Image (cartoon, grey):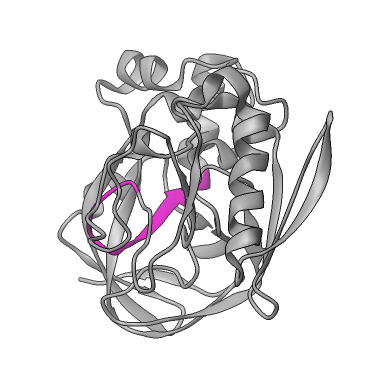
Amino acid sequence: MRIERITRFPVKGLSPELLEEVMLEAAEGLPGDRRFAFAQGDSPFDPADPKWLPKRNFACLAVNARAAAVHAAFDPRTNTLALRAEGQPPLLADLSAEAGRQAAAEWITAFLGEEARGALRLAEVPGHAFTDIPQKAVSLIGMASVADLGARAGMVLDPLRFRGNILFSGAAAFAELDWVGREILLGGARLRVFKRTQRCAATEVNPGTAERDALVPRWLRQHYGHADMGVYAEVLEGGRIAVGDALELLD
């Protein structure tokens, strides 16, 4: 099996960043993944007491399909976030300054319009990741699984719908669901798969058009009897991983 794509999402719910390689650390997720989030106006998230909260407390594709139309790019060297979308002036926000953070929050609130619940605010807490589960993990998805679901549904599905960190080839469709409890070697790192990834309405959103044009959770249940696509794995031993590296299932 082989790593085909490494993806992180600097801002929860917004566009991806493709990586050629990255260093994984033990007990951590993919570095920089879901580092930021836009908390909804009614979200109880408190940066002074950063507890994990379900995705609906933040701008996310499950409730904000329009967010898929935002092109976001974060530069960690300058701590700037670029945001652009059709019909709205582009923004380059310095997240080191409160004015820049406020500008980014106002931009996304205006863009989401009726989908926004009050005035959104940019959230960031060192060491905290705005992931869909409380545990720090790396998410993996088999290319064959995505292709098999698409074939059964009669529609080509972009793997970006599933917003995973690692897309890999070389396994049978949905074989990774049986890896729960087992260890894998991923490039120079060792991980343990601990949970299947249950899919929600976020996967209905086409990442290219921002339209809800697929019934992915329904199709998964219809064709396979579950709503799972991909798995979560914890990093046991850190190391470098790169596109083209091997993924090996340990005995």
Q: Establish if 98 lies above or below 25.
A: above
**Which quadrant of the structure image shows residue 27?**
bottom left
Which residue is at a point 33% across and 60% down the rendered structure image?
Answer: 47
Name the side, left or right, on which 74 lies relative to 28: right
Looking at the image, which is closer to me, 125 or 193?
125
Looking at the image, which is closer to me, 87 or 28?
87
Q: Position of residue 21 (x, y in %)?
A: 60, 77
In the rendered structure, which segment of residues is drawn in magenta? 132-143
Q: Establish if 163 lies above or below 246.
A: above
The question of residue 139 being in magenta is answered with yes
**Which quadrant of the structure image shows residue 29?**
bottom left
Q: Position of residue 88 (x, y in %)?
A: 81, 34
Q: Position of residue 206 (x, y in %)?
A: 63, 27
Is residue 96 in view from this perspective? yes
Which residue is at a point 64% across and 26% down the rendered structure image?
Answer: 156
Name the side, left or right, on which 167 lies relative to 45: right
Is residue 207 in view from this perspective? no
Q: Establish if 96 lies above or below 90.
A: below
Q: Establish if 89 lies above or below 239.
A: above
